[in-house]
Amino acid sequence: MLEFATVAMDTLVHVNIVSERPRHQVEPHVDCALRWFGAVEQVCSRFDPSSEVMQLCRRVGEPVHVSTALVQLVDFALALARLSEGAFDPTLGVELEQRGYATDYRTLRPSTSGIALRDVSFRDVAVDRRTETITLRQPLVLDLNSVAKGLAIDLAVRELRAFDNLSIEAGGDLFARGRNANGKRWRVGIQDPRGDGVLARTLAISEAAVCTSGAYERGAHVLDGRTHQPVAGLASVTVVAPTALAADGFSTTALALGVRRGRELLHHQGLQGVLVTTEGEVVECP
Amino acid sequence: MPRGLAALSASVVAAIYTAGYLRTQPVDLSLASSEPTAVSLVTSLPTATAVAAQQPTPVVIARSVATATPSAAATSSAAVAAGFKDGTYSGQGTSRRGNVWVDVTIQNGRIGSVTITRSTLQYPVRDIAGLPAQTVSRQSSQVDIVSGATYSSQAFRAAVSQALSKATA
């Protein structure tokens, strides 16, 4: 098995490829695939004033023509917000900044938008997919962290379509295709929020993404958009989905919704999930 | 079976991939003759593109001390294409789980390799870089990958950033 690693999106990215090809033949493809992480960051980073999303956030009250990537991603995030009736809300960037989640990992220096905190919600964002424009009705900062990493994983996986057996993992979110080095389905451990190295569950997957959202490592960086308070009740939510974009977005959304409604959402979407409560109870879906 | 938005997510990824791919990769990227091509999803924002060119990513981390050749680039100080001065820079990162020391080698203004020179982190080194010694044990271990809200790279990341700050000084 060939292993590659990089630093992107505030985390480490690991690519494992099971292949008979020599490393020097595979490496250019991995390099190419990993560039998608930089490309997505260039669109989505809240910590980079020159990212496309931060440039968008400086133009309020007018339709702004944006890239296909940004219009699609924001549209997806708004759909999650509507599905969860605002529990997941991608417009709370300023609030996250004020809670201290505003450090640019590339410089380790604070990076804030300078936009004042207002009472905003996902309803203040309008997307027109046909014209590829986004209109912000109020000054706000879009926080796409809950979907950007998943998207980057999916794009990298797509770039590596010539390889039948691979896994890409970025900061605990992953996609696996084909078989592992032992010719079996990839075995994915779900970290138990209560302890390092302890697994809450183990899954065997292929051609699927697994993403986990939780408050146990980065602190309370996920807010319930309905209350504007850090999520409570759930320590982590893991979702298995056909794309890392969906697994990433739905794990954060279910975390924000809480155990009962979060599980209902996953069930309704036909997704497999593992929810761990702050009490340590493991609730599975289906 | 996934339904609704979860099922639709695949078409979102496809649309974004196609938009980026068509813009930046007009020629066929076949497995036989591939040179990595720059990927950009943004074309209408010149400032963003300019900044992207300066970014250190992508960074392919050297997987072992053995494959890293710090001396190779340490003597060169010419290229600053990506905003970093060529050479090898050390950095240290700290987290509540311990410390990690790295050497970052800049070649042609970009990060050529990152080598972990020392670590007192309490979790297995395989969590921060796929070192060959751990590869063997991983293949026989219970799981291939761990999904979690992990932030285990925090110290590593800080160490790399510290080294990069020296490379830009």
Image: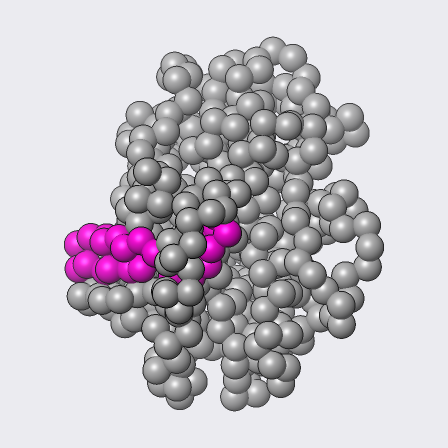
The residue that appears at 42% across and 28% down in the rendered structure is: A93
Asked whether, in this view, residue B151 is left or right of residue A180, the answer is left
User: Which quadrant of the figure has residue A124?
Assistant: top right
Query: Is residue B82 shown above or below B157?
Result: above
Q: Relative to B165, say whether A152 is above or below.
A: below
B67 versus B108 height, above or below: below
Residue occupying image coordinates x 57% and y 13%: A60
Residue A175 point in image, percent of width and height = 55, 64
Q: Is residue A78 above or below residue B153?
A: above
**Image-based side of A242 in relation to B138, left or right:** right
Quadrant in which the C terminus of chain B is drawn: top left
- Prevailing SS of the magenta stretch: strand
Q: Does the magenta segment cover residue B95?
A: yes
Span of residues in magenta:
B88-114
Q: Nearer the viewer, residue A5 or B53?
A: B53
Locate the N terminus of chain B and report the quarter of the image it occupies.
bottom right
Q: Position of residue B123 (x, y in %)?
A: 24, 68
Left or right of B43, for residue A131: right
- In percent of width and height, residue A258 lies at 38, 45
Q: Is-magenta flag for residue B108?
A: yes
Residue at (19% x, 59% y) in the render: B99
Residue at 49 percent across and 73 percent down: it is A3
